Amino acid sequence: MRKHLFVIALVAVSLPVAAFAQGDKFQILDNSFFIEEGFNQERGIFQNIFSWTRDRDGEWNANFTQEWPAPTITNQLSFTIPFGGGEFPAHFGSVLLNYRCQVFQEGERRPAFSPRLSVILPTGRSLDASDRPGLQFNLPVSKQVGDFYVHLNAGSTWLQGVPAAGDLTTNLMSPAFGGSVIWNTRPYFNLMLESVLTLQDTRFGDQSRQKVATISPGVRGGWTMSDSQVILGAAVPVTYADDEPWTTAFLMYFSYELAFSPVH
């Protein structure tokens, strides 16, 4: 089953690459749900992003992210505040402070590339031992191919001093890989297929890493009003972890992008 999931993800990411000529410009960019797109915010524009996911057992998670150019597209600063609830009372999670550098802007033969480095602050309600300080990095690459956009990610999360057996502590390193295909079916309306594979470090037992795979079909649409843009989206992520049953969830997405006056 895991092999089938991984093959489906690779096929979904790879199919459009060689099959289509350059299409029309996308009106919606940098609005994926699970996969980072390789684009920073342009000068004078900042973005507010809210996503909310609920599974069949009533567990829910949400994230609020705000992205700012610093002060141009070359550098971007942002923060992410997670929330959660369900089995536990509603609570904040660890905050991420993010920096991204636009190394390459997209060209005719060149993908966009904007690596990110994040500092993880254990500022949330400590409900489990994973609420620890750490670092995270991701390498997002994006390229338009006809009426499709292909996005690839590779990164890892490092957590420091996580309690282990007895009085011991350990550092956890969890690599993650992902890809997506976005189909621009018509202006301001996209069909999406995203996939993520995470190799999560574990604290106990003989198994050092647990494979967690997610495939998420989704849709997004929106409109532009003068100097602002509103994007709405929804998806049905399906997740499989080692030796555990499949789980499905429902995701809602909202983004509001608007202009501000940058400091000269």
Image: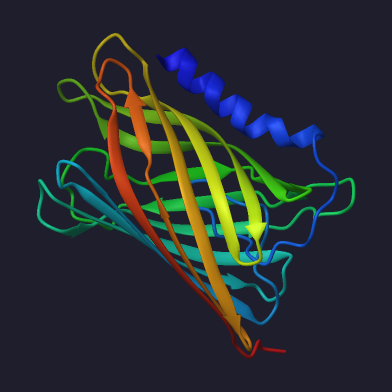
Residue closest to the far front: 186
Q: Is residue 216 left or right of residue 179?
A: left
On the question of residue 33 being in view, the answer is no
Q: Residue 230: x percent and y percent? A: 51, 75
Q: At 69% from the left edge and 52% from the top edge, which residue is drawn?
A: 114
On the question of residue 198 being in view, the answer is yes
Above or below, comparing residue 26 to residue 34 in the picture = below
Q: At 69% from the left edge and 30% from the top edge, which residue is drawn?
A: 14
Q: Residue 236: x percent and y percent? A: 37, 44
Q: How many marks?
A: 0
State the residue in front, 202 or 89: 89
- Position of the N terminus, as image quadrant, is top left
State the residue in front, 58 or 197: 58
Q: Residue 31: x percent and y percent? A: 55, 60
Above or below, comparing residue 77 to residue 21 in the picture = below
Above or below, comparing residue 29 to residue 18 in the picture = below
Q: At 60% from the left edge and 88% from the top edge, which residue is drawn?
A: 260
| Quarter of the rendering containing residue 161 | top left
- Position of the C terminus, as image quadrant, is bottom right
| Quarter of the rendering containing residue 134 | top left
